[in-house]
Amino acid sequence: APPLRDLAAESGRFFGLGISGPMLDQPRYTAIASTEFSSVTPGNEMKWGSVEPTRGNLDWTGADRIVDFAEEHDQEVHGHTLVWHSQLPNWVANGDFADGELRQVMTDHVTTQVGRYAGRIARWDVVNEPLNEDGTLRDTVFLREIGPGYIADALRAARAADPEARLYINDYNTDGVGAKSDGMYELVRSLLDQGVPLDGVGFQSHLILGQVPSSMRANLQRFADLGLEVAVTELDVRMQLPADAAKLEQQAADYGAVVGACVAVTRCTGVTIWGFTDADSWIPPTFPGQGAALPWDENYQPKPAYHAIVEAL
Ligand code: XIL
């Protein structure tokens, strides 16, 4: 089949990869990463803990390498992520800040990082995972120290630092209609009402075998109807190991359903998978006993899920 990036481009979409910096030394990895995908999202290299491990000491090595790789291969970069409660440097996570200080620290961080890559980033996940499962705002250091306005503050700082980048809020378990996605819907509606710069909503889609929400297309569509872009940003479909033929067929159907939901929504800009080979996935270390979540197996051979993506694009 033609590269996934070419199939997606036929409908004006990207097909993206959550890319792994440490794998860029492996030719077997880069051969596929550079040819099948038209967008890359750094898996870890742009997180705050990676770029500023201690206060004032900025390290762009890992991030630069991925941006350079992307440009070499005519790929977009999906910046991930600026304001998130996880993978923070200790000095932010445990920092005891004076009144108002974290607000300045956060907006400076956004300004510095977005400014550094201005013109080179297609989309930024400005705020990642702001919601609880019930749709209320998650209790994070940012909510506690700054209040709910931290989201608008971060978006405004990002827009000022790179007016070209499309600004997203991204979360998981928001893929179908439900309490959490209702919370996202209310959040983004109120941001738009207040004139806050926001261009899109990302749906991570870290899914469990056989559990693609039947309302996914309708859910994406209701956000699109607000005038926003939507994107599937971190797709994987995990299963209890060992994999077998029946599970791999179900997984193919699941991948096809997610890609099909995006393709059915005009403003869905593309789909990013969170890794491509089962040899390099966050699932086994994070969900013990589970894995085989990606469209290529651990020997870099395409699985049924890969063929289902081809069909759905
Ligand atoms: C994961 C990475 O893939 C892992 O390598 C890392 O150890 C933890 O984070 N939601 C996100 C991503 O937004 O940043 C996470 O990535 C997966 C869940």
Image (tube, helix red, strand yellow):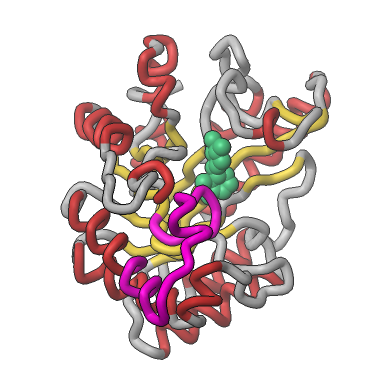
- Number of marks present in the image shown: 0
Ligand 1 is in which quadrant of the figure? top right
- Residue closer to the observer: 99 or 123: 99
Q: Is residue 226 left or right of residue 178?
A: left
Give the image location of residue 202, x and y in percent: 49, 58
Q: Which residues are magenta?
A: 82-106
192 inside magenta stretch = no
- Residue closer to the observer: 122 or 288: 288
Q: What residue is drawn where x is 19% and y is 57%?
A: 115
Q: What residue is drawn where x is 40% and y is 12%?
A: 26
Quadrant of the image occupied by residue 219: bottom right
Quadrant of the image occupied by residue 77: top left
Q: What residue is drawn where x is 47% and y is 70%?
A: 224
- Residue closer to the observer: 215 or 145: 145
Give the image location of residue 193, x and y in percent: 42, 89
Q: What residue is drawn where x is 27% and y is 65%?
A: 108
Residue 21 visible to the viewer: yes
**Residue ranking furthest to the bottom:** 194
Give the image location of residue 84, x and y in percent: 49, 59
150, above or below 108, in the image? below
Residue 234 visible to the viewer: no
Q: Is residue 48 left or right of residue 58?
A: right
Give the image location of residue 51, x and y in percent: 34, 44
Quadrant of the image occupied by residue 42: top left
